[in-house]
Amino acid sequence: MKVPQINPLSIFKTDFGSTKELYAYARNKIINCAKKENKEYLIIANTKTNKILFERMGSKDFVDIRDFSFPSKEKDNIVLMHGHVTRFGSPLSPTDCYNLCDEKYKKIIAFNKKGRFSLLQRKADSNTEEAKKFFKYGIFFEKPPILPKNPLKKWLVKTFVNSQKLYENWIKYFVEKPNINFKYFSTMFK
């Protein structure tokens, strides 16, 4: 597999002694690419074997993974990690979340240039079909239930609160419902 080198210190490696070492490699490479190239970098890894399965540099907004085939027997161990290169970073997009639900791998993580991240993890009993519908259709048509009912308070929240943070709270609210049962964690806005 031919993988672009971000700089002379960005060494391509596929096997790791621990999952911690694998995550550190991925995080550093993704952040380095975001800072130096202003492009997204994607790494797909198996955290049981601690091996990289796929790496690719993309554009500022997107990394094409259509030519990667998720190994069906290993999906419960696969983590997809990539960068979000906007100035302050952004949480996982509906497309990111939909991809996890559609392919049914374990976890997706997005890092910003500062190393902060947002993570969505599928659990063994997660309702991926309901989540998939939400990320494909519902998120664009439903009113966020996290907004206050009072019109003045709603206007204040929409006007003065970071819209990315509101979006992230809505995603967390939805995916952690007992009937959906995903895990969402983020340090993106801390």
Image (cartoon, rainbow, N blue to C red):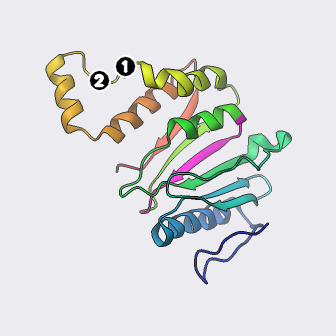
Q: Is mark 2 on a helix, strand or loop?
A: loop
Residue type indicated by callout 1: Lys
| Residue annotated with mark 1 | 143
Which label lies toward us, 1 or 2? 1
Residue that lies at the very extreme toward the bottom in this rendered image: 8
Question: Would you say residue 12 is visible in this rendering?
Answer: yes
Give the residue type that dot 2 points to. Leu
Q: Residue 173 carries which label?
A: none
**Relative horizontal placement of residue 68, taking residue 183 as reference (left or right):** right
| Residue that appears at 56% across and 26% down | 136
Q: Name the residue under label 2.
A: 147
Magenta-drawn segment: 103-113
Instruction: Determine the image quadrant of residue 70.
Output: top right
Indicate the position of residue 63 as horizontal and vertical percent values: 61, 53
Q: Are marks 1 and 2 in contact (CB under 8 Å)?
A: yes
- Element at badge 1? loop
> Is residue 109 inside the magenta stretch?
yes
- Examine the rendered structure and indicate whether residue 30 appears above or below residue 91: below
Question: Which residue is painted at 61% across and 26% down in the image?
Answer: 132
* Residue shown at the point (31%, 38%) measured from the top left: 163
Above or below, 185 against 87 in this view is above
Q: Quadrant of residue 4?
A: bottom right
Q: Which of 65 and 132 is in front in this view?
A: 65
- Whether residue 122 is visible here, answered yes or no, is no
Spot occupied by residue 106 in the image (x, y as percentages of width and height): 68, 41
Task: Tell me, yes or no, whether the highlighted magenta stretch contains residue 144.
Answer: no
